[in-house]
Amino acid sequence: VEQMIAFIQPQARLLILTTGAETPAKIAAFLTERGFGKSRMTVLAAMGGKDERRFDGVAESWAHEVPAFNTLAVDCVAAPDAALLPRVPGLAGALFEHDGTMTKQEVRSVTLSKLMPMRGALLWDIGTGCGSVAVEWMRGARYARAIGIEPRADRRAMAAANALALGVPKLELIDGRVPEALEGLEAPDAVFIGGGLSREVFEAAWDALRPLGRLVCNAVTLESEALLLELHKEFGGELVKIGVARAEPVGRLTGWRPLMPVTQWSLVKR
């Protein structure tokens, strides 16, 4: 049922084939939690049958007990403080549960533009952390899939929680270290290496990548950057330095606080 969360947007009109009697109440809770409590809901039960019934209400006060066989219509109405969850990449960092080590919002937007989410395509997110890139990939195109490889259990738990909260519950998470964890996985259409970068990891991912697949590596350390320069000379692609600064208070005034610069290497497998 969490799959519908990605479609909650101002003025959206949704027609949902539900999975049981409890589903409308769950969806009402999702709407209310995200500032869409005034959304109008209509349940059409047993359409065309002798027990056909209709139930109307709003999300924040939904209390109907409905039959299991039903279809739900939702007219999304956003409050001024509603969460804005667009399908284009670049969700605010505050929407994710994380421990500080995540791909920042601005860098994530550029990263996803190079990964190019497409319908039904599969991403390998190597060193997935809290899952921000994998989650945005799956939100970016219908039926897009992702496998996150992350050796730390606490970060896998965060990634799973973020996937549920942001409407992509089918994110697959693997406990393992690369490149060993990549063996036997379905060939990807895109690969993001956000952690655990080495020549061995790159070569394993590149060999597995499908034709026209996209690979993106982000580096923040000098050692990782040196490796990207070396790989760029050998394989080509596009090398970019991304610098972001955010305005923050400096006493009673305001100044620019820079984030760590990111070196990004991207290429397409031709």
Image: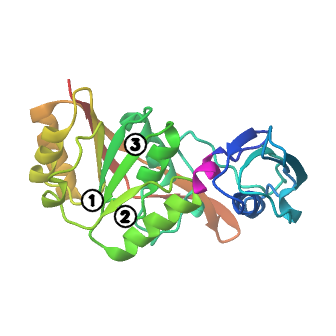
Judging depth in this view, the residue of 253 and 114 nearest the camera is 114
Toward which corner of the image does residue 144 lie, by quadrant?
A: top left
Secondary structure beneath dot 2 equals loop
> According to the image, label 3 marks what residue?
111
Q: Position of residue 226 (x, y in %)?
A: 16, 50
Secondary structure beneath dot 1 equals loop
Q: Is residue 14 left or right of residue 139?
A: right
Report crowding for label 3: few under 14, some 14 to 19, many 20 or more residues within 10 A (C-alpha): many
Q: What residue lies at 40% left-to-right and 42% top-to-bottom? A: 111
From the image, which quarter does the C terminus lie in?
top left
**What amino acid is at disc 3?**
Thr
> According to the image, label 1 marks what residue?
195
Question: Which numbered marker is on residue 129?
Answer: 2
- Real-space Cα separation, disc 2 to disc 3, in angstroms: 15 Å
Relative to 45, residue 26 above or below: below
- Real-space Cα separation, disc 1 to disc 2, in angstroms: 8 Å
Toward which corner of the image does residue 66 lie, by quadrant?
A: bottom right
- Real-space Cα separation, disc 3 to disc 1, in angstroms: 14 Å
Judging depth in this view, the residue of 229 and 208 nearest the camera is 208
Secondary structure beneath dot 3 equals helix
- Of callouts 1 and 2, the N-terminal one: 2
Relative to 144, residue 55 above or below: below
Q: Which residues are magenta?
A: 1-6
Tags 1 and 2 touching, CB below 8 Å: yes
**What amino acid is at disc 2?**
Gly
Q: Position of residue 84 (x, y in %)?
A: 69, 50
- Of callouts 2 and 3, the N-terminal one: 3
Q: Is residue 164 left or right of residue 66?
A: left
Judging depth in this view, the residue of 269 and 118 nearest the camera is 118
Q: What residue lies at 31% left-to-right and 43% top-to-bottom? A: 264
